[in-house]
Image (cartoon, rainbow, N blue to C red):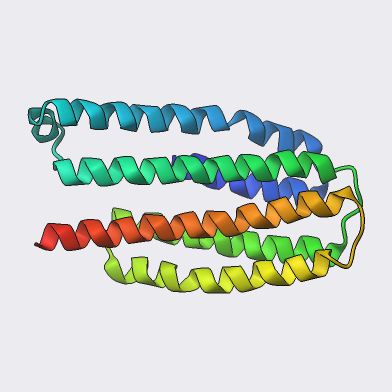
């Protein structure tokens, strides 16, 4: 799920940078895969809850199954925000967007994706320090998003609304990544008790 959503995020930002409507529309089609994988994780989690012996057969604990399900749900929501970016990107691909705005969007997007990647890495490596760093980095992302919002207020037109939605989703991806990191910390601390 992480790899698919990461690829969607990278591609939609490339589509915005290059004014590539076809790539933006392609990203919209990939959300179904993320949804299917989330439902697979949810189904496995429910099976484990119904019969605890399945957890042993799968080589995991009930706590790990619950954390995996929670993180899967968060990744699915991040995918939904990438789709929101894609829908708004389709609206602005035919418009000439200020290069400074596009550059700042790319910077914020890169940081948001970095935070997302770091949160997943902290989960896979069971690394509390990395999870805490992710939480600390989201304040930098929020500042970058505020800068973009101030910059777009100087412009007029409906494309400003679409850009605002893109900025909001980039910020939300960072915030959801913090939720992943907090789940990782709770899981690791719970394992130590």
The image position of residue 111, as x and y in percent, is 57, 65
Q: Eyeballing the image, is 26 above or below 120?
A: above
Q: Is residue 84 visible?
A: yes
Q: Nearer the viewer, residue 133 or 190?
A: 190
Residue at 65%, 42% in the rendered image: 84
Does residue 8 appear anywhere in the picture? no
Instruction: Estimate the x, y position of residue 42 in percent, counting from the top left.
Output: 32, 31
* Camera-nearest residue between 55 and 11: 55
Q: Residue at x 36, y 46 (%)?
A: 71
Looking at the rendering, which quadrant does residue 65 occupy?
A: top left
Q: Quadrant of the N terminus?
A: top left
Image coordinates of residue 49 in percent, x first then y, are 17, 31
Please give left or right for residue 53 compared with residue 16 in the image: left
Quadrant of the frame with the C terminus: bottom left
Q: How many marks?
A: 0
Instruction: Specify whether 84 is left or right of 95.
Output: left
Q: Residue at x 88, y 61 (%)?
A: 98
Q: Is residue 91 above or below residue 121?
A: above
Q: x and y percent of residue 185 in the render?
A: 27, 62
Q: Residue at x 49, y 62 (%)?
A: 115
| For residue 146, above or below residue 57 | below
């Amino acid at each position: 799920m992480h790899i698919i959503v990461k690829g969607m995020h990278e591609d939609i930002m490339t589509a915005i940078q290059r004014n590539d409507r076809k790539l933006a529309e392609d990203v919209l089609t990939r959300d179904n895969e993320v949804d299917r994988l989330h439902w697979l994780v949810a189904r496995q989690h429910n099976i484990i809850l119904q019969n605890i012996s399945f957890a042993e057969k799968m080589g995991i604990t009930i706590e790990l199954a619950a954390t995996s399900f929670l993180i899967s749900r968060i990744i699915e929501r991040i995918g939904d925000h990438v789709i929101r970016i894609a829908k708004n990107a389709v609206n602005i691909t035919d418009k000439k967007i200020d290069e400074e705005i596009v550059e700042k969007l790319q910077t914020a997007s890169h940081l948001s994706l970095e935070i997302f990647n770091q949160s997943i890495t902290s989960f896979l490596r069971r690394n509390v320090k990395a999870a805490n760093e992710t939480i600390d980095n989201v304040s930098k992302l929020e500042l970058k998003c505020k800068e973009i919002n101030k910059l777009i207020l100087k412009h007029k037109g409906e494309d400003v609304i679409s850009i605002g939605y893109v900025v909001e989703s980039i910020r939300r991806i960072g915030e959801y990544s913090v939720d992943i990191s907090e789940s990782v910390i709770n899981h690791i601390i719970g394992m130590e008790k």
